Amino acid sequence: MSLLDQINSPVDLKKLPIEELPRLAEEIRKKIIEVVFKNGGHLGSNLGVVELTIALHYLFDFKTDRLIWDVSHQCYTHKILTGRRERFDTLRQAGGLSGFTSPEESDYDVVQVGHAGTSVSVASGLAAAIDMLKKPGKVVAVLGDGALTCGMTFEALNHAASLQKNLLVILNDNKMSISRTIGAMANYLNKLRMSPLYEDVKKEVYQILEHLPVVPRVGVAAKKAIDHLRAAAIATLGGFIFEELGWSYYGPIDGHNIPKLIQTLKEIQRPRVAGKPVILHIITEKGKGSAPALADPYRFHGIGPIRYSEEGKISKTPPDKPTYTEVFGKAIVALAREDKNIVAITAAMPEGTGLVEFEQTLPERYFDVGICEQHAVGFACGLAKNGLKPVVAIYSTFLQRAFDQLFQEIALQKSPVIFAMDRAGLVGSDGPTHHGVFDITYTRLFPDFVVLAPKDGAELAEMLKFALTLNQPVFIRYPRTTVPDGQIPNSKFQIPNLQLGKAEILREGKDGAIIAFGSMVYPAVKATEILSAEGKQIMVVNARFVKPLDEVLFSRLSEEQPFLVTVEEHSLSGGFGSSILETLNRLGKKTNHIIKLGIPDRFIEHGPREQLLAALGLSAEGIIQKIKSII
């Protein structure tokens, strides 16, 4: 019987002798690889924290203590050890386990989270509350080195140190976040990896300095010189930045050596350290235990379902059509080759946003700012103010983090920045933390913003080229899926009939009209084709713009058509349909014959995108059913 089969809770884990734990780690790795290859998920990051997770659950009781995972995408071992082993095969499947921590699944999961840089803030609040309420327990936060590019992390490190609470932050350093970590902090961590074990050397330095001869009459100047020598000696060691912020720094240590991890964690629990904020710096290998993940850590950070060929090589059936991301990546490179003022910005997501080719071909005009969306937007403002044409490629869910910058640096300044909002709509198995279903609401709030969405790949390329002709902020939203037209436009793509705020009539009809936005256009067309065969002639309009709206066309349709159905892959609250209702109401038009289809006012669970859309009535079949119920 395997060791893993005996583990139904951390209580079972604590019964194992320490020398058996490496074997358990290998069994867990095998399980993670098997399930992630079948279901998709975050592979490399989870393989890197297997030993750390075992050590934490071996020493702590996280029913009393609290464990916070930054982003929480690296929680697979944690799930396996906390009573979810038998359900682990359902990972990221509809109705199955989430790919992130979820309090609905287990008391061991404190929060549901999917964005980077938040763990130290939440953990410090938990530690302060435990202290105020006189409760037992220690709080542990695990964050990756990529989180040290987040402003929120540094805000929390600064404040938490002043609280002096019983808080342990484990810095999981694998030299990467999703892509390779960049910036000055990444360089600093690289120096720390090359240094000796900080805590041991620090003790030796203190011992030496304490034995320096001190003559009572040496004078103030000499005493200051000795103090300066003491400070200089400590400053040459790693961890000095953290120590100056008020944290006790341990490390760096091997994050795959379970006995060393347990020994160090026990050392941190000693009275002279306990009760103070501590940073433990561990070095791990992203993708450990999987040859493909080690060879290509970028691709294997997060993967879809894959399989092995008969030759033992990874085999993945390529999609028959390109994705919107690929179309955007090709289009921006083609446009940038023609216009030297175009620059591209990403917040640590070059692969996910399709900017790899841009980085490789035009590196002097490519900026990866790290996981700091607020800075990305402010940085883009500065570039635009000097005459450049910044294109910020960013996930819809991550742009939310820069809402204030959209107001201050973009809206108020009228900065002509283009935002390519990838993953707008339902993203599938990543679930509610990553669904991009609120961006229409928060972008159409501000004056002078242009917000639009393409119906297919050709239109995405056209919209990007069109956006570059405007001297105002532009937001182009597109989903995480393949393009329905199957096209990656070449460098000669045109803007045939794209006009600011003008919709496109795709199909005429007098029995009603569907006004579809972005990804919902093709399902709407398919629905009307089926209805046409049944004798019902329904008009289809490709809205293209949500701001500004085609007020002339929609006003006319509200008077001529017996009903209007708006369809959007977005929250109904404040979304595309709401914008039409508001506009027609302002113009004094009737609105009681308008029906909105979209995402209801609740968080949508994880599962395959097409399955989620169908369940929400956002498919051709769902549109047909709604129209038949109206008729």
Image: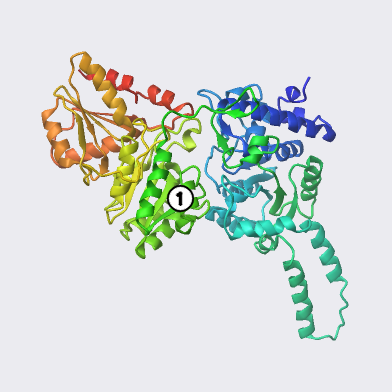
Q: Image height check: is 605 above or below 73?
A: above
Q: In the image, what residue occupies the spot 44% across and 30% down?
A: 604
Residue at image position (82%, 61%) is 203
Residue 161 is drawn in which quadrant?
bottom right
Residue 491 vertical placement versus 210 (above, below): above
Q: Quadrant of the N terminus?
A: top right
Q: SS for tag 1?
A: helix
Is residue 186 shown left or right of residue 54?
Answer: left
Residue 8 picture location, percent across and down? 71, 24
Q: Which residue is mark 1?
A: 358
Counting from the top left corner in percent of width and height, residue 603 is at: 44, 32
The image shows residue 215 at horizontal and vertical percentages of 87, 82
Q: Amino acid at mark 1?
A: Phe
Crowding around mark 1 (Cα neighbors within 10 Å: few <14, some 14 to 19, many 20+) is many
What kind of colouring is applied to the model shown? rainbow
Q: Nearer the viewer, residue 27 or 202?
A: 27
Residue drawn at point x = 21 percent, y = 45 percent: 499
Residue 390 appears in the rendering: yes
Q: How many marks?
A: 1
User: In this rendering, would 292 be left or right of 304?
Assistant: right
> Which quadrant is the C terminus positioned in?
top left
